[in-house]
Amino acid sequence: MIAPPGAGKGTQAELIAARYGIAHLSSGELLRREVAAGSPIGREAAVYLERGDLVPDDLVLSVLGGPLMEAAKSGGYVLDGFPRTRAQAEEAYRMARQVSGVELQAVIHLRVRRSELRRRLLERARVEERIDDTPEVIDHRLHVYETETAPILDFYGGRGLVIDVDGEGTVDEVFDSIVAALEPLRAGLA
Protein backbone atom coordinates (compact mmCIF):
# COMPACT_ATOMS: atom_id res chain seq x y z
CA MET A 1 0.00 0.00 0.00
CA ILE A 2 1.41 3.36 -1.01
CA ALA A 3 -0.55 6.46 -0.25
CA PRO A 4 -0.21 9.73 1.58
CA PRO A 5 -0.98 9.99 5.28
CA GLY A 6 -4.74 9.88 5.83
CA ALA A 7 -5.56 8.07 2.57
CA GLY A 8 -6.80 4.95 4.37
CA LYS A 9 -3.80 2.63 4.01
CA GLY A 10 -4.28 1.04 7.42
CA THR A 11 -8.00 0.49 7.02
CA GLN A 12 -7.68 -0.99 3.55
CA ALA A 13 -4.63 -3.08 4.48
CA GLU A 14 -6.59 -4.67 7.35
CA LEU A 15 -9.47 -5.50 4.99
CA ILE A 16 -7.13 -6.95 2.36
CA ALA A 17 -5.32 -9.05 4.96
CA ALA A 18 -8.60 -10.40 6.33
CA ARG A 19 -10.04 -11.19 2.90
CA TYR A 20 -6.96 -13.05 1.67
CA GLY A 21 -5.82 -14.57 4.98
CA ILE A 22 -2.44 -12.83 4.96
CA ALA A 23 -0.54 -10.76 7.51
CA HIS A 24 -1.01 -7.00 7.80
CA LEU A 25 2.34 -5.37 8.53
CA SER A 26 2.10 -1.70 9.47
CA SER A 27 5.45 0.01 9.80
CA GLY A 28 3.83 2.89 11.69
CA GLU A 29 2.13 0.56 14.16
CA LEU A 30 5.32 -1.44 14.72
CA LEU A 31 7.28 1.78 15.30
CA ARG A 32 4.60 3.18 17.65
CA ARG A 33 4.79 -0.08 19.68
CA GLU A 34 8.56 0.37 19.98
CA VAL A 35 8.02 3.97 21.13
CA ALA A 36 5.40 2.90 23.69
CA ALA A 37 7.71 0.15 24.98
CA GLY A 38 10.53 2.67 25.39
CA SER A 39 12.94 0.43 23.48
CA PRO A 40 16.17 1.91 22.11
CA ILE A 41 14.68 1.79 18.60
CA GLY A 42 11.49 3.38 19.93
CA ARG A 43 13.32 6.23 21.64
CA GLU A 44 15.24 6.98 18.47
CA ALA A 45 12.15 6.66 16.23
CA ALA A 46 10.04 8.91 18.51
CA VAL A 47 12.11 11.96 17.60
CA TYR A 48 11.33 11.49 13.90
CA LEU A 49 7.66 10.58 14.42
CA GLU A 50 6.96 13.66 16.54
CA ARG A 51 8.34 15.94 13.80
CA GLY A 52 6.54 14.07 11.04
CA ASP A 53 9.82 13.06 9.43
CA LEU A 54 10.54 9.66 7.95
CA VAL A 55 12.22 7.26 10.34
CA PRO A 56 15.66 6.27 8.97
CA ASP A 57 15.78 3.15 6.80
CA ASP A 58 17.92 1.15 9.21
CA LEU A 59 15.42 1.58 12.07
CA VAL A 60 12.41 0.74 9.90
CA LEU A 61 14.10 -2.31 8.42
CA SER A 62 15.20 -3.53 11.85
CA VAL A 63 11.58 -3.39 13.08
CA LEU A 64 10.05 -4.85 9.91
CA GLY A 65 12.66 -7.41 8.85
CA GLY A 66 11.65 -10.28 11.13
CA PRO A 67 7.87 -9.90 10.77
CA LEU A 68 8.25 -9.47 6.99
CA MET A 69 10.21 -12.70 6.55
CA GLU A 70 7.89 -14.62 8.89
CA ALA A 71 4.79 -13.39 7.02
CA ALA A 72 6.37 -14.27 3.67
CA LYS A 73 6.91 -17.84 4.85
CA SER A 74 3.36 -18.04 6.24
CA GLY A 75 1.44 -17.23 3.08
CA GLY A 76 2.00 -13.56 2.35
CA TYR A 77 1.50 -10.07 3.60
CA VAL A 78 0.24 -6.61 2.86
CA LEU A 79 2.63 -3.80 3.77
CA ASP A 80 1.12 -0.64 5.14
CA GLY A 81 3.35 2.43 5.30
CA PHE A 82 6.44 0.75 3.93
CA PRO A 83 8.38 1.43 1.84
CA ARG A 84 8.49 5.20 2.14
CA THR A 85 11.68 5.95 0.24
CA ARG A 86 13.25 4.66 -2.95
CA ALA A 87 16.02 3.01 -0.91
CA GLN A 88 13.41 1.18 1.17
CA ALA A 89 11.53 0.17 -1.99
CA GLU A 90 14.66 -1.26 -3.54
CA GLU A 91 15.61 -3.11 -0.34
CA ALA A 92 12.09 -4.53 0.12
CA TYR A 93 12.05 -5.67 -3.50
CA ARG A 94 15.48 -7.30 -3.07
CA MET A 95 14.42 -9.00 0.19
CA ALA A 96 11.20 -10.34 -1.33
CA ARG A 97 13.09 -11.84 -4.27
CA GLN A 98 15.46 -13.68 -1.90
CA VAL A 99 12.73 -15.65 -0.20
CA SER A 100 11.81 -18.77 -2.15
CA GLY A 101 8.21 -18.69 -3.35
CA VAL A 102 7.70 -15.00 -2.59
CA GLU A 103 6.70 -12.70 -5.39
CA LEU A 104 5.78 -9.04 -5.16
CA GLN A 105 2.40 -9.05 -6.88
CA ALA A 106 0.97 -5.55 -6.62
CA VAL A 107 1.45 -2.08 -5.21
CA ILE A 108 -1.88 -0.48 -4.39
CA HIS A 109 -1.70 3.31 -4.71
CA LEU A 110 -4.60 5.16 -3.09
CA ARG A 111 -5.18 8.56 -4.72
CA VAL A 112 -6.74 11.20 -2.45
CA ARG A 113 -6.80 15.00 -2.83
CA ARG A 114 -4.62 16.95 -0.38
CA SER A 115 -7.61 18.88 1.04
CA GLU A 116 -9.37 15.59 1.84
CA LEU A 117 -6.22 14.13 3.40
CA ARG A 118 -5.85 17.15 5.64
CA ARG A 119 -9.52 16.94 6.69
CA ARG A 120 -9.20 13.23 7.51
CA LEU A 121 -5.99 13.69 9.48
CA LEU A 122 -7.41 16.55 11.54
CA GLU A 123 -10.45 14.40 12.34
CA ARG A 124 -8.18 11.48 13.29
CA ALA A 125 -6.20 13.82 15.56
CA ARG A 126 -9.42 14.83 17.30
CA VAL A 127 -10.66 11.26 17.74
CA GLU A 128 -7.42 9.35 18.41
CA GLU A 129 -5.33 12.14 19.96
CA ARG A 130 -2.28 11.10 17.92
CA ILE A 131 0.77 13.28 18.53
CA ASP A 132 1.73 13.12 14.87
CA ASP A 133 -1.51 14.72 13.65
CA THR A 134 -1.13 18.42 14.52
CA PRO A 135 -1.84 20.85 11.64
CA GLU A 136 1.84 21.74 11.28
CA VAL A 137 2.99 18.12 11.38
CA ILE A 138 0.22 17.10 8.95
CA ASP A 139 1.39 19.67 6.41
CA HIS A 140 4.97 18.56 6.90
CA ARG A 141 4.07 14.88 6.53
CA LEU A 142 2.16 15.56 3.31
CA HIS A 143 5.16 17.45 1.95
CA VAL A 144 7.49 14.59 2.96
CA TYR A 145 5.18 12.12 1.22
CA GLU A 146 5.18 14.19 -1.98
CA THR A 147 8.97 14.56 -2.04
CA GLU A 148 10.19 11.26 -0.55
CA THR A 149 7.50 8.61 -1.02
CA ALA A 150 5.50 9.45 -4.15
CA PRO A 151 8.59 9.06 -6.37
CA ILE A 152 8.80 5.34 -5.53
CA LEU A 153 5.69 4.85 -7.62
CA ASP A 154 8.03 5.21 -10.62
CA PHE A 155 10.23 2.38 -9.26
CA TYR A 156 7.26 0.02 -8.96
CA GLY A 157 5.49 1.37 -12.03
CA GLY A 158 8.53 0.46 -14.12
CA ARG A 159 7.99 -3.13 -12.98
CA GLY A 160 4.29 -3.09 -13.87
CA LEU A 161 3.18 -3.43 -10.25
CA VAL A 162 1.24 -0.22 -9.52
CA ILE A 163 -2.55 -0.36 -9.29
CA ASP A 164 -4.08 3.12 -8.94
CA VAL A 165 -7.26 3.26 -6.87
CA ASP A 166 -9.47 6.27 -6.14
CA GLY A 167 -9.27 6.50 -2.34
CA GLU A 168 -12.00 9.10 -1.89
CA GLY A 169 -15.03 6.83 -1.82
CA THR A 170 -16.47 5.09 1.20
CA VAL A 171 -14.35 2.42 2.86
CA ASP A 172 -16.44 -0.26 1.13
CA GLU A 173 -16.26 1.42 -2.29
CA VAL A 174 -12.47 1.74 -2.07
CA PHE A 175 -12.15 -1.86 -0.89
CA ASP A 176 -14.36 -3.13 -3.72
CA SER A 177 -12.12 -1.29 -6.22
CA ILE A 178 -9.03 -2.85 -4.69
CA VAL A 179 -10.52 -6.36 -4.76
CA ALA A 180 -11.63 -5.88 -8.38
CA ALA A 181 -8.03 -5.02 -9.27
CA LEU A 182 -6.50 -7.87 -7.23
CA GLU A 183 -8.77 -10.72 -8.28
CA PRO A 184 -7.33 -11.03 -11.81
CA LEU A 185 -3.85 -11.27 -10.25
CA ARG A 186 -5.01 -14.08 -7.96
CA ALA A 187 -6.68 -15.88 -10.85
CA GLY A 188 -3.37 -15.75 -12.72
CA LEU A 189 -1.67 -17.55 -9.81
CA ALA A 190 -4.12 -20.45 -9.75
Image (spheres, rainbow, N blue to C red):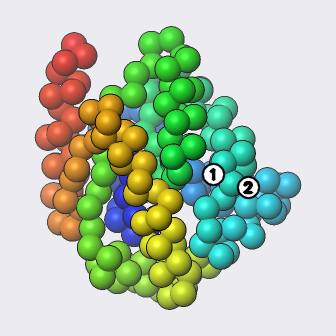
Residue nearest the observer in this picture, 106 or 186: 106
Residue marked by disc 1: 30
Q: State the image quarter where residue 118 is shown.
A: bottom left
Residue at image location 16% in from the left, 49% down from the top: 177
Residue at image location 30% in from the left, 82% down from the top: 115
Does dot 1 land on a helix, a strand or a loop?
Answer: helix
Q: Is residue 172 left or right of residue 107?
A: left
Q: Is residue 16 left or right of residue 33?
A: left
Image quadrant holding the C terminus, namely top left
Asked whether residue 135 is in view, the answer is: yes
Relative image position of residue 100 (x, y in whole percent): 50, 11
Q: CA distance from mark 2 to mark 1?
A: 6 Å
Does dot 2 land on a helix, a strand or a loop?
Answer: helix
Total residue callouts = 2
Instruction: Say which mark, if any, is on residue 81.
Output: none
Residue at image location 51% in from the left, 72% down from the top: 141
Residue marked by disc 2: 34
Tell me if mark 1 has few (under 14), some (14-19) or many (20+) residues whose alpha carbon lies within 10 angstroms of its own.
some
Q: State the image quarter where residue 131 is shown.
A: bottom right
Query: Which amino acid type corresponds to the residue marked 2 in the rendered image?
Result: Glu
* Image position of 90 with respect to 70: above or below: below
Tell me if mark 2 has few (under 14), some (14-19) or many (20+) residues whose alpha carbon lies within 10 angstroms of its own.
some
